[in-house]
Amino acid sequence: MNVIMMDANVIATAQRQDPVQPFFAARDLHAYYGESYIVQGVSLDIRQGEILALLGRNGAGKTSTLRTIARTDLPALMTGEIWLQGAPLHRMKAHAAARAGVQLVPEDRRIIPGLTVEENLTLARVAPGHGWDLERIYAHFPRLAERRRQEGVTLSGGEQQMLSIARALAREVKLLLLDEPYEGLAPVVVREIERILHDIKKLGITTIIVEQNAVAALQLADRAVILDTGEVAFTGLAKEVLDNAELRREYLAI
């Protein structure tokens, strides 16, 4: 009952939010890998509880934009501002941004070798800023519950993806960043990850998803931003992209 009430409160808060002040805002981001100019003036807004699909061809700057938002060392943010519920993420390092509620699920998953599934999850909850407890995680990820004593790096690719997402949810999450959650997974496993992401959506968790399977991402998302060589080429409703074959052909090759 407490879980249901908490989730309802999250959604109600999202519905009451002042539309003039977005929950998350990136303003004119410019970021570099050394001399390589990768993120070129990207701006985007997200309301609380919304899912944004960040799309584009390979090399468009999608992952680099996610990493910039998460405040990783690379790419280096040179100019621009990043705000999350009034907190200036652009002034923070990655560890501080994580404490502020930004949780990145990277494409390579970064499961810690030598630790079991449960130890990976428990370690995520060591520092202040706790999110879901183990009971709640296992309720949403029953396969992880079955493998809680198994070393994390010996899981299948799909199970490692589940663990990576669950580990992020074990922290306090205000903004969840998903980088290629379906990458390299069999269709049957993709459907299971999709189920988990739909559960996350129902809970009102604010999310940015980068995914080469653009149609799957668009079917999940409320809105979409398409990048082209580091710049924003389109911003609008996800349904607009699904309904616009010419736009998909030009920027997504689908």
Image: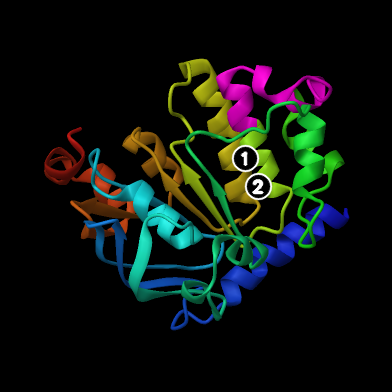
Is residue 236 at all visible to an observer of this figure?
yes
Q: Residue at x 71, y 59 (%)?
A: 172
Q: Residue at x 62, y 27 (%)?
A: 160
Nearest the camera: 119 or 187? 119
**Residue type marked 2:** Ala
Which residue carries the number 1 mark? 165
The colour scheme used to paint the residues is rainbow
Whether 154 is among the magenta residues is yes
**Mark 1 Cα-neighbour bin, 10 Å: few <14, some 14–19, many ≥20:** many
Q: Residue at x 82, y 42 (%)?
A: 122
Label 2: state its secondary structure: helix
Mark 2 and 1 residues: CB-CB less than 8 Å, in contact? yes
User: Main SS of the magenta segment?
Assistant: helix
Q: Is residue 142 above or below residue 44?
A: above
How many angstroms separate mark 2 from mark 1 (CA)?
A: 5 Å
Q: How many marks?
A: 2
Nearest the camera: 181 or 120? 120
Query: Where is residue 223 shown, x and y percent of the image?
Result: 37, 56
Query: Where is residue 149 shown, x and y percent of the image?
Result: 84, 22
Which residue carries the number 2 mark? 168
**Residues in magenta, as a range:** 144-162
From the image, which quarter does the C terminus lie in? Answer: top left
On screen, residue 125 versus residue 86, left or right, reads right
Q: Is residue 184 above or below residue 166?
A: above
Residue 225, image quadrant: bottom left
Query: Where is residue 109 shown, x and y percent of the image?
Result: 56, 35
**Residue type marked 1:** Ile
Query: Where is residue 69 shown, x and y percent of the image?
Result: 45, 61
On screen, residue 205 versus residue 234, left or right, reads right
Nearest the camera: 165 or 127? 127
Whether 52 is among the magenta residues is no
Label 1: state its secondary structure: helix
